[in-house]
Image (cartoon, grey):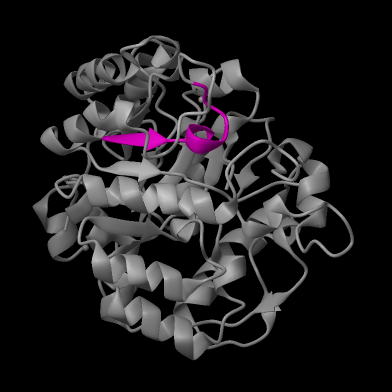
Amino acid sequence: MAGVAERKRPWRVAALVALTALVGCWFAVRRPPPSKLDPAPSATPTERPFVVDVHVHLGPDGVDRLGRLMQRWQFDHVVNLSGGSPARGLGEQLAAARAAGGRVTVFTTLSYSDARFPDYGARMAAALRRAHAAGARGLKIAKVLGLGLPGPDGRLLAVDDPGLDPVFEAAGELDMPVAIHSGDPRAFWLPTDERNERKDELEAHPGWSQFGQEVPTFDQILAQLERRVARHPKTRFISVHFGNCAEDPDRVAGWLRKYDNLYVDTAARIPEMGRHPPEKMRAFFVEFQDRILYGSDLGVSAEPEPLFLGSEGKQPAGAKEEQRFFTATRRYFETADRDFEHPTPIQGSWRISGIDLPDAVKRKIYGENARRVIRLDLPR
């Protein structure tokens, strides 16, 4: 859902400011060079897989804190989706990634400010090429596309707007995967009343509500996304937040069967996925074990800023919330436990059940798929 990059902080993507930014054989290859990050605990394949979190929002001042989190919760690499654009923030984020000693991969963002020019697509594609040359490995597109970014004529640019084709074609040519956030939970289009399961979250973040706004519907946004993916078969798309359709895994399964270039991540959607029968979701993960990437939607800035743990309420997250977030996440993937608290209480009061994934499937989802899809040069 909305990450910390979408909140009012200096490292937020510019458009969002303007519009509201395997050691065994694994470590036998080589260890990462010394860095500002505390090394993650060594492991063997029988203890845990190599874990890559492909959905993190990291402020350049948060590298040391991230290192402590990686050591405490045993994950090894992150993809920072809040990399900024060449005109704003990317250089600083790439420098922070270098200080992290190879444990952070940076995605750039669209040059949203170029949307006001008639040749916005060409301008954005040129910025993407500059970002790639500087070291960005992928492109992150925020939900503002389709829901809040006006074009030169003042009308909202759709996810599948033809004027943006040069951007997505360039991403394919540059071998840069596109992490795309299109839409939001279906409840965000409903009135914020007692019948809305996301009432607490929407009251904490009223700007996230789409109810009554002059924006496409939930289904229209997803249709725009599907047309965009279909139009660029040589470009890899990671539809974040489980395709923003965790309410309907059958619909997501249909996309994955139809489009070989589409992947999904799990960020901030375990609460919703965990509501479905565990047998159904286990079968989903087994069928699409090569197409799902682990992501958390963790947001990290320097202390005393609170952590962003998939979402946030009116009170800042503390040690108890951090423990619940990481423990319940692993519990969902790795156990057959039933009826336990999900990672993110602000996202709903229901309970979830674990899907107890086979070890081979866990290894893929936790890290192997990220190595392949994002072309990460990581220890095996």
Residue under the image location 38 percent in, 36 percent down? 140
Observer-nearest residue: 212 or 361? 212
Left or right side of 341 for 132: left
Q: Give the range drawn in magenta.
A: 138-150
Residue under the image location 26 percent in, 20 percent down? 131
Residue 314 in view here: no
Instruction: Report x, y in % for residue 266.
Output: 45, 60
Relative to 185, residue 103 above or below: above
Is residue 107 within the magenta segment?
no
Left or right side of 11 for 349: right
Quadrant of the image for the C terminus? Answer: bottom left
Quadrant housing residue 159:
top left
Observer-nearest residue: 156 or 343? 156
Is residue 149 within the magenta segment?
yes
Observer-nearest residue: 244 or 98? 244
Quadrant housing residue 342:
bottom right
Relative to 311, residue 10 above or below: above
